[in-house]
Amino acid sequence: MLIPKRDTGFQHPVPSEITPRAVYEQRRQMLRLMAGGAAGAAMASWAARDALAATARPGKLAALAATPSTLAGAQTVEKLTGYQDATTYNNFYEFGTDKADPARNAHTLKTQPWTVEVEGLVKKPGKYGIEDLLKLSAQEERIYRLRCVEGWSMVIPWIGYSLSELLKRVEPLGSARYVEFVTLADKTMMPYLGSRVIDWPYTEGLRLDEAMHPLTMLAYGMYGEVMPNQNGAPVRLVVPWKYGFKSAKSIVRIRLTEREPATAWVKAAPQEYGFYSNVNPTVDHPRWSQANERRIGEDGLFAKKRKTLMFNGYEPQVASLYAGMDLKKFF
Ligand SMILES: Nc1nc2c(c(=O)[nH]1)N[C@H]1C(S)=C(S)[C@@H](COP(=O)(O)O)O[C@H]1N2
Ligand SMILES: [Mo]
């Protein structure tokens, strides 16, 4: 994301994508009816959802059942970004810096077995196998915008649950104030770890109250399926009101700390990237404006048509986290 000229690496997806979008939309609507309706209650068994998902998913990866989230801010009337766009225009520098690289290279990522270690200032540290982690709370589908610091955005139906569900379980100590996320750095699976763009492993961090916010999501899938490798399988963060890089992919360790953790992008370019990195149209990046964005797949390759919204449109939900803070200073 550091390298704007890389934007020319965009490869427009071929129109032959087999994603049965109408079918997917239909399925989602169906799930919503099932979850909400009185008669739906009996039908909305996991088995029924599974069967439905199996017949009507985009069709590439294993289906992952989920109920539509009722959380404020977790649904939208906006058009979804196409599956093909969302899985071929990625930032995952462990697999290359070109937007098309992760889709090409991430097949070498082995996501099983996988463990996530939760440690640091918690009463109950532990190692969670990915299967157990996945079952730790009911999977919800949440439609979030993700806005990259480079100036593009997508609208994606993610599957997962609030990170707070996991954090509550490990019981943070009173001294814990931040959460650090450490992602996989394995040279046998990740061809780009030899590069020095990032001081690997890629790490990220949140303040504990940000991490505990219900919108902050541990995501295991998208578009009704398990997470594609290039999007951060088997589990990643999605923090919808922050620039995309705060949403760490392929997480292996979560550590609660007293001090603000160093993060990969702050270490790489401290004058350009801050710890908070809240989406904010009034605070420019030193090299470009953050006032507008283009929606991948919709607005044309170089057009920047949409106004970027404060906190990426999640202001009603998250503004109180930053009451009284100078967001120009804490960018
Ligand atoms: N481990 C890891 N996580 C990462 C990145 C990365 O390079 N490595 N890139 C970040 C950036 S800059 C963005 S914009 C989002 C992109 O997520 P997406 O490809 O699913 O849209 O992932 C973030 N998480
Ligand atoms: Mo990004």
Image (tube, rainbow, N blue to C red):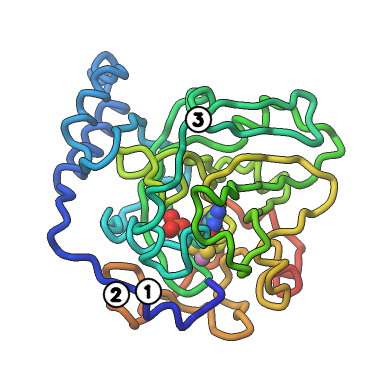
Residue sitting nearer the eye, 145 or 254: 254
Distance between mark 3 and mark 2 Cα atoms: 40 Å
Q: Amino acid at mark 3?
A: Pro
Neighbor class of circle 1 (other Cα within 10 Å; few <14, some 14-19, many 20+) is many
Q: Amino acid at mark 1?
A: Arg
Q: Amino acid at mark 2?
A: Asp
Residue ID for mark 3: 113
Mark 3 and mark 1 residues within 8 Å of each other at the beta carbon? no
Q: What residue is drawn where x is 68% and y is 62%?
A: 199
Distance between mark 3 and mark 1 Cα atoms: 37 Å
Q: Is residue 118 above or below residue 76?
A: above
Q: What residue is drawn where x is 58% and y is 43%?
A: 251
Residue sitting nearer the eye, 105 or 43: 105
Mark 3 or 1, nearer chain start: 3
Q: What residue is drawn where x is 47% and y is 59%?
A: 95
Report x, y in % for residue 175: 87, 38
Neighbor class of circle 3 (other Cα within 10 Å; few <14, some 14-19, many 20+) is few
Mark 1 and mark 2 residues within 8 Å of each other at the beta carbon? yes
Mark 3 or 2, nearer chain start: 3
Residue ID for mark 1: 294
| Of labels 3 and 2, the one closer to you | 3
* Mark 3 close to ligand 1, CB under 8 Å: no
Residue ID for mark 2: 299
Relative to 36, is 318 on the left or the right? right
Report x, y in % for residue 222: 36, 44
